[in-house]
Structure formats: C-alpha cells, structure tokens
Image: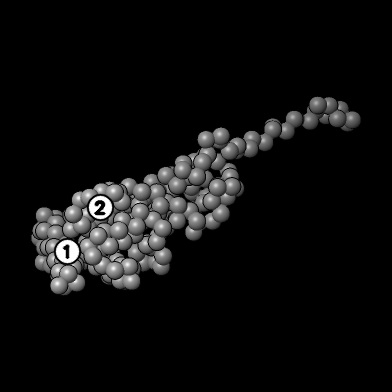
Amino acid sequence: MVTRSGRTRQARPARQERKEPPHLTPELIHATALAMVDADGIDGLSMRKLAAALDVNPMSLYHHVPNKAALLQGISRLAVADLRIASADDDTPWPEQLRQIGHSFRTLAHQHSKLIVYLLAHPGFIQREGPLWGALCHTLRRAGLPDAEVGRIGNVLLTFVSGFVLAEINGSLGDLLDAADAAEIDRDFEAGLDILIAGLGSVQRIRAE
C-alpha cells in the first residue's frame, strides 16, 4: 500500500488466532489431563499446559471446566471409572466381592499412583456418589451390616486399604513389613484382606445367634 508521502507501507500479516477445535469435549480434556498427571504428577498439570497439549487457547478450557479443582474432580471420576467391581445384581458371595473391591482399588492406585497419592492427602477423596463407595456399601449390606453401621465400617475399611496402598506406593511398606519383593507384598495385602473379611464374618455370625 502506498502512503501520501509516496512510501510503500508493508501490509501487516493477519494475526493467527488459535481456534477451539470442534472435537474439544470434557471427556477429551479429562483424559488428556489424567495422562499428564500420570506422567508428571499434579504439579505438572496446569490449565496453560493442558491447553498447550490440546493445542487450544487456554480460555477455551473454561467453557468446559471452571477451574483446576473441577478438573481434578473430573479426572478422579475418570480414573475411578476403571474400577472392576461387581454390579448391584451380582450374586457373588460378599467375601469375594469385598476382596474384588480391595484388589481393584489397589490396581487403580498403581495405574494412577501420582493422582491417588495426591487425592489420599486431600479431603473429599471418596466420592459418596461414585462407584467405589456404592459397591462397598452394597457389599457390606450383603455381609449383614445394618444401614446405620454401613457408612462407619466402610470408612474404616477404606482407611486401612488406602493406608496399605499409600505406604506401598511411597516405598515405606517394604521396610515396615520387611518385604523383600513384590510377591511378598502381594501376600501381605491378601493377608490383610483375609483379616478384614474374617472380622466381618464374625460380626455376621454374632448377629445371627
């Protein structure tokens, strides 16, 4: 373009704005965020880094998740969705169901160890409307516990299992149990589940007398 002075003015290049792809969804956001946490931990996750990984404008994320706290809740639900637990109409004996819940939770903790370690250190880890708590309460009712005690005993069981898993992940369990290898820790976890199940079985027998 020629100005009045006769000089040629260079046309400014059009500013390229990062556009929100049509496929951006809460599911994609949560899946990408979970993968980032698995790789780099909670400290490696930010809205800015997540936007870069998705190649979108950071502001686009806020159309789907209002803040990082909501993002963490979303990826927690996504991770817990991988739990392999019996459905409500499953007639498997309750001891086996309880053992399955314990093993499934431990497997989940190893798959997403950085996320689980973070969540265990913060309030609100157990989502009362989630599949883990629902399956546990259902199993405890099948074990003969009255509704008034299901919540209390459920909290105690999850506390014990979570403590074992946390100590296993951070490496302190091997010293506490003098366990030399992973197979020994597996046996110790199984022994803990045996004790919990036997205790609930005793309660059931006492109530039946």
> Can you say whether 132 is above or below 147 in the image?
above
- Check contact, mark 2 vs mark 1: CB within 8 A: no
Residue 113 or 95: which is nearer the viewer?
95
Cα separation between marks 2 and 1: 16 Å
> Can you say whether 104 is above or below 147 in the image?
above
Callout 2: SS:
helix
Please tell me how crowded label 1 is: few (under 14), some (14-19), or many (20+) other residues with Cα within 10 Å: some
Residue 203 or 82: which is nearer the viewer?
203
Q: Mark 2: which amino acid?
A: Ser
* On-image quarter of the C terminus: bottom left
Instruction: Mark yes or no: residue 103 visible.
Output: no
Task: State which mark lies toward you, 2 or 1.
Answer: 1
Q: Mark 1: which amino acid?
A: Ile
Residue 47 or 72: which is nearer the viewer?
72
Q: Residue furthest right?
A: 4
Q: Quadrant of residue 139?
A: bottom left
| Residue with the mark numbered 2 | 104
User: Residue drawn 40% across and 61% down?
Assistant: 128
* On-image quarter of the N terminus: top right
User: Residue drawn 37% across and 62% down?
Assistant: 126
Q: Position of residue 133 (x, y in %)?
A: 34, 59
User: Residue drawn 63% across and 37% down?
Assistant: 17
Residue 177 or 195: which is nearer the viewer?
195
Q: Position of residue 145 (x, y in %)?
A: 26, 67
Q: Position of residue 148 (x, y in %)?
A: 33, 71
Which callout, 2 or 1, points at the residue further toward the start of the chain? Answer: 2
User: Residue drawn 32% across and 47% down?
Assistant: 82
Please tell me the numbered disc located at residue 197: 1
> Can you say whether 90 is above or below 158 in the image?
above
Callout 1: SS:
helix
